[in-house]
Image (cartoon, rainbow, N blue to C red):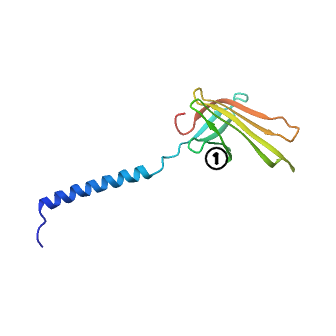
Amino acid sequence: MAPKSRLFQKNFSAASLRSTALAIVLIVTASPARAEVVTLLCQNEAQPGSTFTLQVDYDRKTVADVYSNGTLGGTVAATITESEVTWDHIDEHVEVFKGNWGRFQFAGSLNRLSGQGRVTYWRMDTSQPSWSMSGPCRRATQKF
């Protein structure tokens, strides 16, 4: 078998390198940007020692409350600006209290500059008042 010339090897290596670089560029530009989902652990100032957790998906523009076992509660649409995240969602026709059906509100805000968070839950069609939690939030997994 005849040995390959150095010129062939150099040309092959340069061509291979260019093709690989081009393929990487095409894959990176074709891939969607990694979604930024932030989990925030918030201190409830009204009850020292208690917390509430929210998950914000900046790409999908949604907010969800996170239960103590780590599962997501309702995910709702949010308005996201440079300075705050706000949401106000009403679920229609849900069981709001022991066999009573009605509307349930999940609303709140996050100040992206100060880290202050507020959440309100309200069983709208019962005589029970709404309940709220507010306090400073910090990113549970990354810097907020």
Q: Which amino acid does label 1 sit on?
A: Gly
Above or below residue 36? Residue 6 is: below
Between 37 and 81, which is closer to the camera in this rendering? 81
Residue 62 place in picture, x, y as percent:
63, 43
Residue 55 place in picture, x, y as percent:
62, 41
Direction top: furthest residue: 114
Query: In the image, 28: left or right of 80?
Result: left
Residue drawn at x 79%, y 43% as measured from the top left: 104
- Residue 38 position by quadrant: top right
Residue 31 place in picture, x, y as percent:
45, 51
Which residue was labeled with disc 1? 70
Residue drawn at x 73%, y 28% as measured from the top left: 46
Query: In the image, 97: left or right of 143?
Result: right
Q: Is mark 1 on a helix, strand or loop?
A: loop
- Residue 121 position by quadrant: top right
Residue 135 place in picture, x, y as percent:
67, 29
Between 139 and 33, which is closer to the camera in this rendering? 33
Between 103 and 79, which is closer to the camera in this rendering? 79
Badge 1 density bin: few <14, some 14–19, many ≥20, Cα 10 Å: few
Query: In the image, 108: left or right of 104?
Result: left
